[in-house]
Image: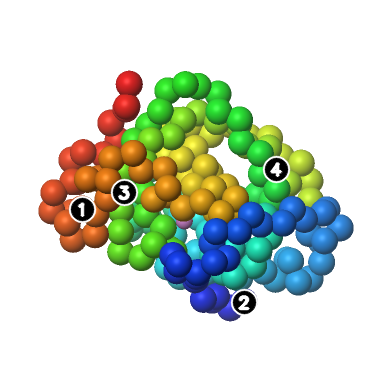
Amino acid sequence: MSILKVAQMGHPILREVAKKISEKEINTPRIQQLIDDMIETMREYDGVGLAAPQVHEGLQIAVMEIASENPRYPDEDAVPTTIFINPVITPLTEETMGIWEGCLSVKGMRGLVFRPNHIRLEALDRRGKKISTEYKGFPAVAVQHETDHLFGKLFIDRITDFSKLAFMDEYKKYHLDDGESDLE
Ligand code: NI
């Protein structure tokens, strides 16, 4: 396995719509290797998720893992290593949740983004089998953030109040208490 280079904001691949992949392609050594490398890269940089365009592959593959000991998100619900391919998200509520999001492709920044806090994810797993899972709270936000990457979007595109976009030091100094509030 290897740790891959992470594309930073401004790299055009982060703005492209990634390609769907077939069950047959998923089960090739190249894609299986890519998935393993994405998991290793996500862990190396303490990310809770990573999408293939972030490692310069324009394919609809995302990985997610929320370990309870993740230093970035210590209090959130744990989610086991999850691979989702060709995802389709359906919001299951009008209720939104505000989370200060960060991204391995937008280094050193945090921004407050509101998203539906209960969704259904339909996708293929790493063997090409269909999955359909409901997520609530922080994991629901993480799934939406990663899926956005597969459609050329970054969390900064979702910010509605740019006074809530901050560098890490300023986030810690001035905004630690503003998070997790509901919009409505
Ligand atoms: Ni990201």
Q: Nearer the viewer, mark 4 or mark 3?
A: 3
Under circle 1, the secondary element is helix
149 and 38: which is toward the camera: 149
Does mark 4 have its CB less than 8 Å from ligand 1?
Answer: no
User: Residue at 60% of width from left, 59% of height from top?
Assistant: 16
Residue for badge 1: 171
Mark 1–mark 2 Cα distance, whole angstroms, equals 34 Å
Mark earlier in primary sequence (4, 3)? 3
Horizontal side, residue 50 vs residue 30: left or right: left
Q: Are marks 4 and 3 in contact (CB under 8 Å)?
A: no
Alpha carbon distance from label 1 to label 3: 9 Å
Mark 3 vs mark 2: in front: 3
Image quadrant for the C terminus? Answer: top left
Q: CA distance from mark 4 to mark 3?
A: 27 Å
Q: Name which residue lies at 21% across and 38% down.
A: 178
Work out which residue is located at the far left of the displayed protein and give it: 173
Q: Position of residue 6 (x, y in %)?
A: 49, 71
The amino acid type found where label 3 is placed reads: Gly
Q: Which mark is residue 26?
A: none
Circle 3 residue: 111
Callout 2 amino acid:
Met
- The numbered mark, 3 or 2, whose residue comes first in the sequence reads 2
Q: Residue at x 71, y 39 (%)?
A: 131
- The residue depicted at 66 percent of the width and 44 percent of the height is 87
Circle 2 residue: 1
Mark found first going from the N terminus, 1 or 4: 4
Q: Residue furthest right?
A: 24
Residue at the spot of label 4: 123
